[in-house]
Image: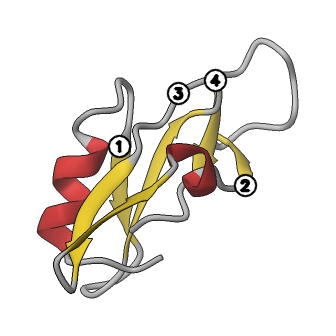
Amino acid sequence: MAVDPSLAAVYWAQVPGATNRSSNDTVTSYFYPCNSTLPDLNFVVGGTNTTIPGLYFHGDVFLDGAPCKSYFKTLCISRLY
């Protein structure tokens, strides 16, 4: 889910260990420890409070530059960027 970059930055600042990595000037992906509990995203649409549960933002597993071995820190790539 693509959102305003400032909103994504505020959201991911709430997740310990989350980092952003830009693939170009317009796309920034956020990576976070896979065992993180992601916060819900709350916002207002047409005067109605709306919540998207954080579990919907869990993305794919990404091994931080390493083959799949248990002693490497495993990160996940977000679905909110």
Q: Does residue 22 appear left or right of residue 52 in this picture? A: left
In terms of secondary structure, where does tag 1 sit? strand
Residue at 26% x, 33% y: name it. 14
Q: Are marks 3 and 4 in contact (CB under 8 Å)?
A: no
Q: Which residue is mark 3?
A: 37
Mark 1, mark 2: which one is toward the viewer?
Answer: 2
- Mark earlier in primary sequence (4, 1): 1
Q: Does residue 77 appear left or right of residue 12 in this picture? A: right
> In the rendered structure, which amino acid carries the disc numbered 2?
Asp
- Mark earlier in primary sequence (4, 2): 4
- Mark earlier in primary sequence (1, 2): 1
Q: Which residue is mark 1?
A: 19
Separation of marks 4 and 2 at Cα, in angstroms? 12 Å
Q: Are marks 1 and 2 in contact (CB under 8 Å)?
A: no
Residue 27 % position (x, y): 36, 81
Separation of marks 1 and 3 at Cα, in angstroms? 15 Å
Residue at 55% x, 55% y: name it. 57
In terms of secondary structure, where does tag 4 sit? loop
- Mark earlier in primary sequence (1, 3): 1
> In the rendered structure, which amino acid carries the disc numbered 3?
Thr
Quarter of the figure with residue 13? top left
Question: In the displayed structure, would residue 39 be above or below residue 52?
Answer: above
Q: Which residue is mark 4?
A: 35
Separation of marks 4 and 1 at Cα, in angstroms? 15 Å
Q: Does residue 68 appear left or right of residue 75 in this picture? A: right
